[in-house]
Amino acid sequence: MGIREDIKTVFEKDPAARSTLEVLCCYPGLHAIWMHRVAHSLWNKDLLFLARLTSHISRALTGVEIHPGAKLGKRVFIDHGSGVVIGETAEVGDDVLIYMGVVLGGTALEKKKRHPTVENDAVLGSGAIVLGPITIGRGAKVGAGSVVVRSVPPEATVVGVPARIAGTPQPSAPSEQLDHNKLPDPVLTVISQVLDRMSRLEERLQAHEIAATAPVPVAVMTSEKTPLKKDEQIYSLLKDVIDPAVGVDIVNLGFVKEVIVNGTDVDVNLVLTTSACPMIEYFKNQVKRKVLSINGIENVTVNILDEPWKWDRTSRQASIKPAIK
């Protein structure tokens, strides 16, 4: 646990680090870890008051409060550091990345193991609060602002209050540790599944109603009403595809940039708020199902366009596509 190893860790985990002198002088999280090693050594020698005094001085100088009884592994990096609190019986493994505002707190008054254990390679996002004698598994990621009160499996990602597992646990490359924008949203996932289920039930009900009330075929035209064109039918059906995040259909939101009909083939171009949108697969499946329900359509391709999303797209679409009555 040498100083050189600590400095190397800073360069690996913080792209803002530019020089060794800068790291030595301007990284309070690093200073807090060094002072904690002194305080922890005093604590193990039963010099409890001196250990707590050293910890208190470190807190005043760095803004990081680490109880001298806490155990920190190798290459732990506290980024920025302000507001970090690590309790007495907390255990932090090797190569753990901790952001500002993280709390490893206790939930009991008895003198026993009452603080979390964070295993190797875990990432704790800004403002994350981990409470109780629980375990954050190896390589797990805790989203910013999450409150964790249950143990987290290895390689899992948890988000929310209280924190819940999002997606399937899977290892991530070191370069992906900071991709907090790619954290999945478990609430949206559940809502999308409910909407998908509801859509399937509605389609089955409509098919049953059509079959039960099938008209008797006649040889003459019973209406002079002009049938809708396929693109108008498609826009009409896509109004049933609701964005779970806001409760508005994707046509009114402006997600549908254009619909291209070429015989039995249809291309639907969508522009979402981000290419990492957790609802992409839901939108694709819903759009395909709706469009394929139109007679004469055999193939549907849904394209996610990589371009800026604009709130005024709806008004532009209304001016170029035919009105739907």
Image (cartoon, rainbow, N blue to C red):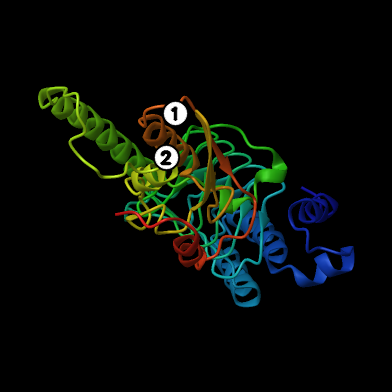
Query: Is residue 178 placed above or below 318 in the rendered structure?
Result: above
Q: Answer whether residue 113 is visible to the viewer in this image.
A: no
Furthest-bottom residue in this view: 60
Q: Position of residue 208 (x, y in %)?
A: 16, 25
Closer to the chain start, of discs 1 and 2, is 2
Q: Position of residue 176 (x, y in %)?
A: 67, 44
**Numbered circles on residues, count:** 2
At x 37%, y 43%, the residue is 233
Q: Work out how far the residue at label 1 is from the one at label 2, CA to CA, in angstroms.
A: 9 Å
Asked whether the beta carbons under mark 1 and mark 2 sit within 8 Å of each other, the answer is: yes
At x 57%, y 58%, the residue is 68
Which is more toward the observer, 8 or 186? 186
Location of residue 63 (image quadrant): bottom right
Q: Position of residue 282 (x, y in %)?
A: 43, 39
Location of residue 133 (image quadrant): top left
Task: Estimate how packed mark 1 is, as few (under 14), some (14 to 19) or many (20 or more) residues with alpha carbons within 10 Å.
Answer: some
Which residue is under mark 1? 297
Q: The residue under label 1 is which amino acid type?
A: Ile
Task: Estimate how packed mark 2 is, as few (under 14), some (14 to 19) or many (20 or more) residues with alpha carbons within 10 Å.
Answer: some
The label shown at residue 230 is 2
Which is more toward the observer, 182 or 265? 265
